[in-house]
Amino acid sequence: MNKKSVTAAAVAVLLGSLLAIVLSSGGSGTAPQPMHAYFFDLSTNELFTADKTLLAPIEAPSGSFKGEPGGVSAFIYSCRQCDPDEWEIRYLLKYSDAAKQHMLQLQEQHPDKAVYMPQDRAATEPFRSGILVKRPEDANWVRKASPEGTTIVREAAVCGSRLARQCRPDPS
């Protein structure tokens, strides 16, 4: 075989291998479907799903709630199976206007990353201090980084002495 034949054969094998990898990994040439997260409509107390990259509060199916978008992130856990009959909404989460604006700026600066979080703690402080949580039955929002917020998040993830299962709308 001459050098041109060997090169052509090598290129054909390489292209065939790449095609096999794409086809075996489920590649169909179509864009992947967006992943979703649960959100809670503050006006109706009902769950809905939306793109998980959205930063709450977001527009809810019922519209606004007290002058701002009425959809907040809902963190759902189960002690058994992720079945609506067995799960609980353990806490809700939203971002202050300043934290949301800070995160949107980071996303614009790093469009190649779905979620970008700098490693520098000082750079994340404006964002972290504006993450607010509450239990569905609580009247007031608290900073997630506060002792009370930390307790809400920590208690949400346990069932007695074992870890709870976090429930998501997309299979994981």
Image (cartoon, rainbow, N blue to C red):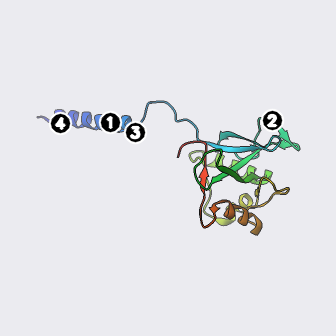
Identify the amino acid type marked 3: Ser
What kind of element bears circle 3? loop
Q: In which quarter of the image is the N terminus?
A: top left
Q: Label 3, label 2: how many angstroms apart (C-alpha)?
A: 40 Å
Comes first in the chain, label 3 or label 2: 3
Residue at image mark 1: 20
User: Dot 1 surroundings within 10 Å: few (below 14), some, or many (20 or more)?
Assistant: few
**Which residue position holds label 2?**
62
The one of 16 and 4 positioned closer to us in this rendering: 16
Residue 27 lies in what quarter of the image? top left
Locate residue 62, reporting x and y percent.
81, 35
Q: Which mark is residue 25?
A: 3
Residue at the spot 60% in from the left edge and 58% down from the top edge: 164
Q: Which residue is drawn at 71% across and 60% down?
A: 128
Q: Do the residues labelled 4 and 2 touch (CB within 8 Å)?
A: no
Q: Please give the label number shown on residue 163.
A: none
Q: Nearer the viewer, mark 4 or mark 2?
A: 2
Residue 60 position by quadrant: top right
Name the residue at 55% across, 35% down.
33
Pick the residue in front: 79 or 142. 79
